[in-house]
Image (cartoon, grey):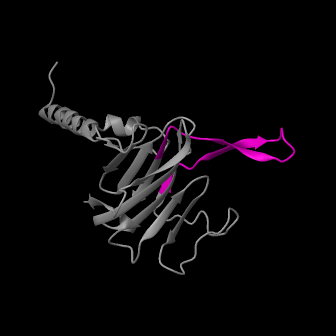
């Protein structure tokens, strides 16, 4: 059986294209699982025995993620100062998502029912999930369920490229002595070079 040269060239081109496609890393999915980061070979920054921090970026997004021990909530307030922001912005992740500028007088939610929640723009995170209602007591209260890790995906289009300054205040980390928090860095802000 003879093949035409154009057929052979087309087969070679498809093979080369397929090989190139398979080498393109798949970015993390914001699902509360750090296997994506580990599969990408991202080296963690060790914050404590129980908490490791991961940074990853591609052409369009930056991901920030961290794990925490079982029983933790791992909520977050992250200060962000980026080229496209006029002031330092706080990204809040708990059972609700929200953002607000930290300058004096800037509006921010003052209670769980505030209309200022769910105003996140150009970023998303896996929040602490509500898992039904507990009706076993006199008062009905929410049940909470949490992922193994917190993940935040941030748009370079909104936040800009260049030098980002970050400070993470991770809260509700379960320890044998109760809940504690971790601030990274303890003083100042971490510099992340965003291409």
Q: Residue furthest bottom?
A: 105
- Report the front residue among 160 and 12: 160
Q: Position of residue 96 (x, y in %)?
A: 60, 56
Image quadrant where residue 34 sits: top left
From the viewer's perspective, tell me whether residue 133 is left or right of residue 152.
right
Residue positioned 83% across, 41% down in the render: 135
How many marks do you count on the picture? 0
Q: Is residue 89 visible?
A: yes
Image quadrant where residue 116 sits: bottom right
From the viewer's perspective, tell me whether residue 139 is left or right of residue 147.
right
In reply to whether residue 143 is colored magenta, the answer given is yes
Residue positioned 34% across, 57% down in the render: 60
Q: Residue furthest left?
A: 5
Q: Magenta stretch?
A: 124-150
Q: Can you say whether 34 is above or below 164 in the image? A: above
- Report the front residue among 139 and 152: 139
In reply to whether residue 167 is colored magenta, the answer given is no
- Report the front residue among 1 and 117: 117
Image quadrant where residue 195 sits: bottom left
* The N terminus, quarter of image: top left
Q: Position of residue 186 (x, y in %)?
A: 37, 57
Q: Position of residue 21 (x, y in %)?
A: 27, 39
Q: Residue furthest top?
A: 1
């Amino acid at each position: 059986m003879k093949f035409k040269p154009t057929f052979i060239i087309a087969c070679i081109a498809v093979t080369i294209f397929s090989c190139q496609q398979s080498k393109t890393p798949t970015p993390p999915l914001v699902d509360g699982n750090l296997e994506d980061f580990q599969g990408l070979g991202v080296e963690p920054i060790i914050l404590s025995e129980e908490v490791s921090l991961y940074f990853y970026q591609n052409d369009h997004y930056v991901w920030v993620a961290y794990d925490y021990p079982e029983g933790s909530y791992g909520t977050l307030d992250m200060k962000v100062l980026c080229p496209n922001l006029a002031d330092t912005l706080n990204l809040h992740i708990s059972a609700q998502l929200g953002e607000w500028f930290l300058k004096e007088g800037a509006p921010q939610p003052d209670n769980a029912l505030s209309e200022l929640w769910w105003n996140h723009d150009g970023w998303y995170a896996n929040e602490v999930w509500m898992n039904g209602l507990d009706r076993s007591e006199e008062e009905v209260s929410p049940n909470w369920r949490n992922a193994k890790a917190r993940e935040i995906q941030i748009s370079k289009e909104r936040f800009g490229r260049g030098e980002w300054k970050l400070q993470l205040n991770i809260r509700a980390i379960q320890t044998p002595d109760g809940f504690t928090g971790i601030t990274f860095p303890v003083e100042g802000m971490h510099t992340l070079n965003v291409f």
